[in-house]
Amino acid sequence: MTKSIYTDYFFDEPAYNTHDGGYVPLEEPTTPEQPLRIPPLLKPDKETATDTYYTVEAQAGETQLLPGKKTKTWGYNGSLLGQTIVFAKGKTMHIDLKNSLPELTTFHWHGLNVPGPYTDGGCHAPVYPGKTRHIDFKVDQPAATLWLHAHPCPSTAEQVWHGLAGLALVTDDVEAKLPFPRHYGVDDIPLVLQDRRFHEDNQWDYDADYDPDGVQGPTAMINGTINPYFDVTTQRLRLRILDGANRREWRLHFSDDLPFTQVASDGGVLPSPVEFTHLMLTCAERAEIIVDFGKIQPGKTVTLYSDDVPLVRFRVHDFAADDVTLPEHLVDIPDPEVTPDTPVRKVVMSGMDEAVMMDGKKFEMQRIDARQKVGNVELWDITNTNDMDGGMVHPFHMHGTQFRVLSRNGHEPYANEHGLKDTVGVNPGETVRIKVWFEHTGVYMYHCHIIEHEDGGMMAQIEAYDPDNPKTYKLMDMDTLMNAIAEERGIDVKDLRLAGMSSYEKMGMKM
């Protein structure tokens, strides 16, 4: 039987970000091509058979992105983005989170199933300048490509824009037996997709570029590289792709529509491989794809595009023949039964610009919007009501869990949505049904992952609770946050302007 090869982007074309009034088209760089930067693997401080110890440091620095002056950037264990952290399933992690930045930050493990809110690292887990927070957790989830980013509401967007985004890879024995490329940096390559605008002296200026519907820039930045190329020395290449942009959707395809195979999504390996020529990712989504260059002659170049703009040029060299084929079935995906007599939870994402809200409200740090018992399996209906000017796709993200996508407006989900997910794009006028369960207690956020939207209030909180072991949490409050940042910046709190504040002010709401 011939396999289907999907040749469209699935999502509703009228809702593409290309139709936004503030859309910033990508432009092909005119600077010389550079080798693609590969984030190095973070070396553990110490490692035993059962435990691994890391230090993750958020720091300011300068990075040579364009010819001329270096760009002032932030990163983890480096000047920009982060070193890739490996979490082996079954091991206990001990991590020192060190803040060497001039202002408070948090360390959010996007996609990692850990207790909340402090280990999860949302807005309730601040690390102040010069301080270190220690966390411990046991890794208990399938192999997956996850990521680490700052999450200090309402400055998440600005800090990610500064460069605080790095990869975290979970490994396990099941994935290790699959016939995937796995030589990191050679045939197993991360691609962190972001975009920036460069101002005078090659600097970024978040305030100048600010848009409440999401900050964009005309220059694609891949792993912190402008105009990158990669030397292909193996027939098959595994690309771990992250949409790490604040706002931009990426509509990906290769030159001459070279087909590729998606083998994993946000939460890990898919049950079956899916063949594509075109793939769209919304903010924070991940896709692991395998590209076969077997029919490409050495000396040729294959280009990865978003729409019609080149992102990475793959320069094909001689390689040994590789006749490995992927099995029809890759892994089994957990699919627990829904807990009887639990109502369907309704979540509504609405608005654009400053009017964005979740369930008709803007986020408040001290408010718990929902509760779900740990171990319960519940259905959530996520609706995007926005239809202004054709509306926009809102990527819905949940902390503290990986969910199953069951349907879109009652129909089958997209072909590559049958695995575990923590982020799902929801079209205007659409309801996506997901199956949700929590394995740890804590307070977790769920929100739109257009980062300016979450800063602007399209976010809520759920407490995953154990009735036999009730807990209380010290939740961050806005006054404490703003006073701390104002002090760090050496200004009066009344003069402090944070990303997202205007969305509350223009709606006459308290942050």
Image (spheres, rainbow, N blue to C red):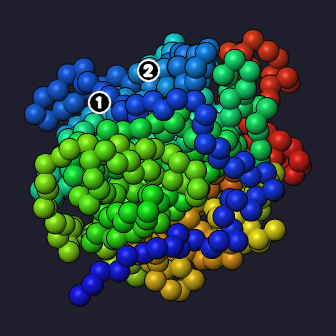
Q: Residue shown at 23%/87% (left/top)?
A: 1
Q: Residue 401, can we see it?
A: no
Quadrant location of the C terminus in the rendered image:
top right
Q: Residue 200, can we see it?
A: yes
Q: Secondary structure at mark 1?
A: loop
Q: Residues within 10 Å of mark 2 (few under 14, many from 20)?
A: many
Is 31 drawn above or below residue 148 in the view shown?
above
User: Which residue was labeled with disc 2?
Assistant: 78
Q: Position of residue 7 (x, y in %)?
A: 46, 73
Is 490 drawn above or below residue 391 in the view shown?
above
Which label belongs to residue 57? none
For marks 2 and 1, the one nearer the N-term is 1
Q: Nearer the viewer, residue 498 or 218?
A: 218
Is 418 drawn above or below residue 409 in the view shown?
above
Q: Secondary structure at mark 2?
A: loop
Q: Position of residue 499 (x, y in %)?
A: 74, 36
Which quadrant holds residue 333?
bottom left
Which label belongs to residue 41? 1
Callout 2 amino acid: Gly
Q: Residue shown at 79%/51% (left/top)?
A: 22
Callout 1 amino acid: Leu
